[in-house]
Image (cartoon, rainbow, N blue to C red):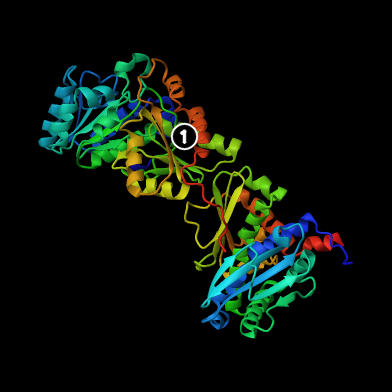
Amino acid sequence: MAGGITFTAVDSTKLATAEIFGRTIAELGAENPNIVCISPDLATSTKMADFLAKYPERFYNVGIAEQNMIGIAAGMAKSGLIPFASCFSVFASLRALDQVHTDVCYQNVNVKIIGTHGGTSFGQAGSTHHAIEDIGVIRPLVNMTVIVPADGIETANAVKAAAATPGPFYIRINRGFDNVVYSTPDYGFKVGKAVVMNEGTDLTIIACGSCVYQAMQAASMLKHDQGLSIRVLNMHTIKPIDREAVLAAVKETRKIITVEDHTVIGGLGSAVAEVVVEGGKACAFRKLGLQDKWSAIGLHEDLLAMHEIDAEGIVKNVLEVMKMDFEADEDWGDEV
Amino acid sequence: MAKEVKITQSDLYAARIFFYAAIPLLKVICESEPKFGDKFIGKNFVFQISALYDKAEGGKFATHFVVEDGKWTTHVGAIHEKPDVEFEFSDLKKFIIFFTGKGMPLPKIKGILKLGILVPVLMALLRMAGLMQAKDKPEKFEDQIMLCKLYLYLIPNGMSQLNKLGHPDVKAVTGISPDRAYALIIEGYPELQSWIRMKAGKTMSGRGEYKRCKPFLAMKFKNPSLALDILMSKADMVQYIREENLFVDGAPEFGGTVGNLMFTVAYYALGTYLDEEK
């Protein structure tokens, strides 16, 4: 297996995404003695047990204290270590925000934050445990790289890239199992570069996280049922965003829908919109996600459907956007 | 009493293509080839081609050109009341027979004494007819490029004209189309590109690169000579795709749709329907 990752796509159907993170960090721990893990008493939930078992002397449980975890991680990074601090996304981004801001980003230290239970993936736990604003909160922080992997294999790639790249990273993964998007890690993952999952010219769907799989399903349904040619971009890196891919989508398809398991304010959709506006070329545009409201409590797949970020919801919105007129209706004269 | 000429719907389709898409190519000849275009420098006049048709507004179909110091402006489907030179066909059928090359029913020429205009106009018209009515592709490379340009500019415009006149086969495609463009491209020659944009029954055609978005489908020919093989129906499109002389970029499953639209334009522009009416 290329890149030293010892699990396969078959494994990824049996492993939760966080478990794949756990295995990856344990493998990286063998390669690099400077890698340490920190947890606010969540080693089981955030699946760091493999690392703990192999390298107990490099694992730190700081108790239920996310702010302390981030502050300690920043200090460790200052001393040359590469700390991976993992807890629920909602707490990493909101409760520990001041420490992330001042101790990590302002110091520009080499801390890797793994936010688990992202979006509505911990649906049954209720709104206090839904991380629906984390990207919007973390993205503006200077020096921070923000990645939302599409599945387990992409999570492994993101963690490896974070370990190899100096500076703060925020990697947001889901609780439980993700649908498998990639069967191999060798698809060209690169921080800051979107992956074209499907070529198309009628409209571009830009998605991140678990919504990438849903977008691909939607594109397939739209091709077979409607004859539509839909481009799908896996925008795994929200910051720095792949401006080139976004501007190409504007230029070449003139219609964009963003899909994220996050509020539509401040996340992927906002990041894409910033690029579109700066690009100066108009396009039809719609952001799918939580429309500035709290989510209900329920199973993740039900919540995806509720917020129209599952395949059927995306299809419905694509068909609506296909009918949107964003340009003055030209005279439709022929050039002579 | 003059014999009544029966004008069919097919005649109207053919006339639309000629008045709106083919005759305007005269300007392309004059702008592309200095040996024709230079003859109009310093001249100001109006040249019109028309065909009498009592059901048309104004009693005839016409397209006219306004030339000002050698610069041509085309007014498609528009009658000029006082052209300096006019070729007027006595009926639509004769006009079509003339332009499809099926016969030589000559028009009435108004302004025949204005030789300084008439002669260079006739030369440019003969150049266009000589290229477009040829059965085989020209040998000279520059002639191949010119003929490609004429074909590429004619075909999408012809499709758009048929759509605008409500041709059912064309409407069936455009009526259900999202906002899409289909392009014809000869690689390495930026001026040898053209396109048709469709959106919910509306169409527009243009020349050069389609810049609004990436075309839904682009037929990319390797060079002018190979393009003419396809455009003049001298080669099999599937075989040319297989041999990589033609590359279909985008949605290849719609290649057949474009091909059918091209054949529909050719059906009227070449007067094939006239043979079937006999």
Front residue (pair A277, A297): A277
Front residue (pair A320, A331): A331
Quadrant the C terminus of chain A occupies = bottom right
Quadrant the N terminus of chain A occupies = top left
Quick one: label 1, few (<14), some, or many (20+) residues within 10 Å?
A: many
Amino acid carrying mark 1 in the image:
Ala
Q: Residue B136, can we see it?
A: no
In percent of width and height, residue A103 lies at 13, 32
In percent of width and height, residue B270 lies at 74, 65
Q: What is the number of callouts on the image?
A: 1
In percent of width and height, residue B49 lies at 68, 70
Q: Residue B247, can we see it?
A: yes
| Residue that carries the numbered disc 1 in the rendered image | A215
Quarter where residue B185 is shown: bottom right
- Name the chain under label 1: A
In the picture, measured across the screen, residue A97 lies left or right of residue B261, that is left
Quarter where residue A60 is shown: top left
Query: Does A82 appear above or below A194?
Result: above
Query: Does A296 appear above or below A162?
Result: above
Residue lying furthest front in this view?
B82
Who's the residue at 14% across and 36% down the image?
A106
Query: Does B260 appear above or below A264?
Result: below
- Local SS, label 1: helix
In percent of width and height, residue A100 lies at 18, 30
Front residue (pair B7, B35): B7
In the picture, measured across the screen, residue A232 lies left or right of residue A64, that is right
In the picture, measured across the screen, residue A301 lies left or right of residue B240, that is left
